[in-house]
Image (cartoon, rainbow, N blue to C red):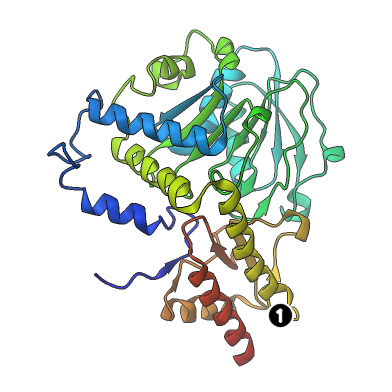
């Protein structure tokens, strides 16, 4: 097998080696089944066991109560930008509040405005999205349909240290880039959604965790595949689900439970990894300049700049020669970005820090 590099991509991102190896070993034929997971019927007992274990693992890791549905849907998080307002805002006569902390929140707002009134409760544009707001800065709408946040912005590298308080208004969160990275109090949310391709599995499936009572708000005129009630009643099987992606979510969540030991332990590992890189930035004497303010720094996406774009290009090229891949910042902001999701091993972090120190010394 060709040597694997350290993949710092923001997504699709690195996956746990044990999960990759098990999928590889059993790709041609699932044990005791005789056919590939790519071939099995989504109505079969085999797939029923797969999707039920994936759901049970998620519930166990996140301590999700019984009054929450766990759905596996098509379209990634980007479709949820539309499904959330379609199901909770359309025809309600209410306003949806959005807390705008970066690029993905901006995309979510664009789609929500097609379904109803939107209030941007806070916008970090003036500070180039380098922090999240304090509770006192939020201009929330009394009786809003919901409040939407992006707990971790992958592009700008900012992360909420805690959920904002929204009272009786449901909190909706796009957790694509930090789901399963740390414990979460699910009961503080009306809806949690996440594209799987950063911490939970490969691209192709979105995980939606939805409080039961919100299904009563769903309009009756939605197309079936965009209707949370239909998808919940069908237990994610109204149509053929992304079977392989769900299978891989099962493998990743099994790894988190059995090999990592749960989200508390995963969170400590992630904090330790992030601290190593932020220390390298902070101790560089200004050679590296972090984007996010210290109180809003992401443990998943570490973003920084160098003095010039030419120096950044050299850093990226030299890093690649050392097996440090996908360090280029998003095209909208430039710079350097290291995405260090659950599957990034500590060895990769240490290799990157060593390179950062040596690159600084030689320049």
Image quadrant holding the N terminus, namely bottom left
Residue shown at 27%/30% (left/top)? 47
353 shown above or below 138:
below
Dividing the picture into quadrants, the one containing residue 30 is top left
Can you give x and y, in whole percent of width and height, for residue 348 in the image?
49, 70
Per the image, label 1 sits on a secondary structure element best described as loop
Viewer-closest of 31 and 12: 31
Q: Is residue 188 left or right of residue 36?
A: right
Specify few, some or many for label 1: CA neighbours under 10 Å numbering under 14, 14-19, or 20 or more.
some
Residue linked to disc 1 = 284
Q: Is residue 79 visible?
A: no
230 shown above or below 112:
above
Residue shown at 30%/30% (left/top)? 49
Viewer-closest of 211 and 146: 211
Q: Is residue 330 left or right of residue 288?
A: left
Image quadrant holding the C terminus, namely bottom right
Q: Residue furthest right?
A: 136
Residue shown at 55%/65% (left/top)? 338
Residue shown at 55%/43% (left/top)? 179
Q: Is residue 97 visible?
A: yes
142 shown above or below 202:
above
Can you give x and y, in whole percent of width and height, for residue 312 in the image?
57, 76
Dividing the picture into quadrants, the one containing residue 16 is bottom left
Can you give x and y, in whole percent of width and height, for residue 20 in the image?
32, 54
176 shown above or below 233:
below
How many labels were placed on the picture? 1
């Amino acid at each position: 097998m060709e040597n694997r590099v350290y993949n710092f991509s923001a997504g699709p991102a690195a996956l746990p080696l044990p999960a990759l190896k098990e999928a590889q070993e059993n790709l041609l034929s699932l044990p005791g089944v005789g056919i590939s997971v790519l071939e099995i019927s989504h109505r079969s007992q085999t797939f029923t066991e797969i999707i039920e274990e994936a759901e049970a693992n998620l519930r166990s890791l996140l301590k999700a109560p019984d009054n929450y549905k766990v759905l596996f849907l098509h379209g990634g998080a980007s479709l949820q930008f539309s499904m959330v307002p379609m199901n909770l805002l359309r025809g309600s006569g209410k306003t949806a509040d959005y807390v705008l902390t970066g690029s993905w929140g901006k995309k979510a707002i664009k789609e929500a405005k097609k379904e109803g009134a939107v209030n941007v409760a806070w916008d970090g544009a003036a500070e180039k999205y380098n922090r999240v707001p304090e509770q006192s800065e939020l201009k929330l709408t009394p009786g809003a349909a919901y409040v939407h946040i992006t707990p971790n912005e992958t592009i700008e590298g900012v992360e909420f240290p805690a959920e904002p308080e929204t009272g009786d208004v449901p909190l909706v969160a796009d957790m694509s880039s930090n789901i399963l990275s740390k414990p979460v109090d699910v009961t503080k949310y009306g809806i949690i959604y996440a594209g799987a391709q950063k911490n939970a599995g490969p691209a192709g499936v979105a995980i939606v965790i939805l409080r039961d009572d919100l299904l009563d708000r769903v309009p009756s005129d939605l197309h079936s595949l965009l209707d949370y009630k239909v998808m919940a009643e069908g237990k994610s099987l109204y149509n053929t689900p992304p079977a392989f992606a769900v299978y891989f979510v099962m493998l990743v969540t099994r790894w988190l439970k059995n090999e990592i030991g749960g989200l508390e332990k995963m969170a400590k590992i992630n904090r330790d990894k992030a601290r190593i890189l932020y220390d390298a930035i902070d101790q560089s004497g200004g050679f590296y300049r972090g984007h996010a303010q210290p109180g809003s720094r992401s443990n998943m996406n570490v973003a920084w700049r160098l003095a010039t774009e030419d120096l950044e290009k050299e850093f990226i090229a030299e890093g690649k020669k050392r097996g440090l891949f996908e360090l280029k910042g998003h095209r909208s902001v430039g710079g350097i970005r290291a995405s260090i999701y659950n599957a990034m091993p500590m060895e990769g972090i240490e290799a990157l820090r060593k390179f950062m120190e040596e690159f600084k010394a030689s320049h």
